[in-house]
């Protein structure tokens, strides 16, 4: 019988049955094979390998009344872009790939604060759902940019869930802090927790974000393997004490003025013990250096007019595990 005349059954061997057996590799193990690179984040301080940002576009030119967008003042567009280029170049100079959201709605000037849209996980990105109406709609452009970069989206916050990426803070591969407050609700946190526990996270530390703060990254931020910069007057004992028992050193930001107006805690670690922080916070810089942390300062004063800073503008897509 010719090959063309064989039946489908005859093309198999004599012991009939399923031949398409499942591969047992985990999603995380398959990231490079399937998705082209290790899109994995389980730390705030492991060497930064990839991030996604939004360089200020036409959307910031449309701002006439800053109060409409919860800004303190109108930004100078070119100065804002120059400052954005400067801090992203620091990332590149230290080995990170910087991906951009290249298209965005022109009525969404807060889209430059990318961390709110994305939370990196050990297996790809969670696409967040913004709490405020004037920011909803940024997500569509972000999802396209993630797809273009090749980063898997492992969950989109849905239903009644609200969660912004800066309400999550990684401690290590097994531990994450998730905050509830004005920008994230219990249902949003539940959805994030469901995802990360399925990835092997063993401990979720719940943080009630106090009145007057939107996110975690104005209150605490890891700066080294066992060192965390904190705003001591508003970081709960129930978060600090478990970290102290793990051997973490708390570096207390010494100036309320620098935390509130200089956004001193809103920095980015680009490697263990090496951070980029906003210029104009000398007391906090001194405290970090005294604790053995190397500090690179950068002027982002124009970008801070929208009440966001470096950590707000940087969504991590890949970091070394620590």
Image: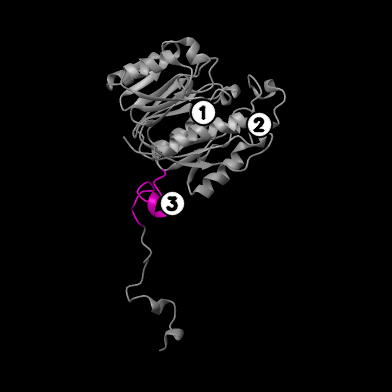
Which circle's residue, 2 or 1, is located before the other in the chain? 2
Front label number (3 vs 1): 1
Q: Is residue 37 magenta?
A: yes
Crowdedness of circle 1 by 10 Å Cα count: few (<14), some, many (20+)?
Answer: many
The local secondary structure at tag 3 comes to helix
Mark 2 — residue?
A: 60
Q: Judge left or right: residue 40 versus residue 73.
A: left
Q: Quadrant of the N terminus?
A: bottom left
Task: Find out whether the residues at labels 2 and 1 contact each other: C-beta distance under 8 Å.
Answer: no
Any mark on residue 35, and which? Answer: 3
Q: Nearer the viewer, residue 162 or 8?
A: 162
Tell me residue 150's x, y (percent): 48, 49
Which circle's residue, 2 or 3, is located before the other in the chain? 3
150 over 306 or under it: above or below: below
207 over 43 or under it: above or below: above
Residue stretch rendered in magenta on the structure: 23-39
Q: Nearer the viewer, residue 250 or 171?
A: 250
Crowdedness of circle 2 by 10 Å Cα count: few (<14), some, many (20+)?
Answer: many
Front label number (2 vs 1): 2
Mark 1 — residue?
A: 312
Q: Judge left or right: residue 257 versus residue 204.
A: right
Tell me residue 236's x, y (percent): 41, 15
């Amino acid at each position: 019988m010719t090959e063309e005349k064989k039946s489908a059954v005859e093309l198999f061997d004599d012991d009939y049955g399923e031949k398409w057996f499942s591969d047992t590799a985990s999603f995380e193990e398959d990231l490079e094979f399937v998705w082209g690179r290790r899109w994995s984040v389980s730390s705030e301080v492991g060497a930064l390998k990839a991030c996604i940002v939004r360089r200020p576009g036409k959307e910031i030119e449309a701002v006439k009344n800053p109060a409409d967008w919860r800004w303190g003042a109108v930004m100078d567009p070119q100065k804002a872009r120059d400052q954005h280029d400067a801090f992203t170049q620091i990332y590149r100079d230290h080995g990170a790939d910087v991906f951009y959201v290249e298209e965005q709605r022109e009525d969404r000037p807060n889209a430059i604060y990318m961390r709110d849209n994305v939370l990196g996980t050990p297996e790809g990105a969670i696409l967040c759902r913004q709490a405020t109406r004037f920011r909803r709609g940024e997500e569509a452009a972000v999802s396209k940019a993630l797809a273009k970069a090749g980063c898997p989206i492992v969950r989109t916050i849905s239903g009644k869930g609200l969660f912004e990426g800066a309400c999550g803070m990684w401690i290590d591969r097994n531990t994450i802090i998730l905050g509830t407050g004005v920008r994230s609700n219990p249902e949003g946190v539940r959805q994030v927790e469901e995802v990360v526990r399925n990835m092997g996270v063993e401990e979720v530390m719940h943080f009630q974000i106090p009145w007057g703060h939107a996110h975690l990254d104005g209150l605490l931020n890891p700066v080294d393997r066992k060192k965390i910069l904190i705003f001591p007057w508003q970081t709960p004992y129930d978060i600090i004490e478990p970290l102290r028992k793990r051997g973490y050193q708390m570096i207390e930001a010494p100036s309320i003025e620098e935390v509130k107006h200089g956004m001193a805690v809103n920095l980015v670690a680009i490697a263990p013990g090496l951070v980029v922080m906003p210029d104009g916070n000398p007391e906090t810089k001194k405290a970090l250096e005294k604790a053995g942390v190397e500090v690179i300062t950068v002027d982002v004063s124009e970008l801070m007019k929208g009440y966001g800073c470096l950590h707000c503008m940087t969504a991590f897509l890949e970091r070394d595990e620590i």
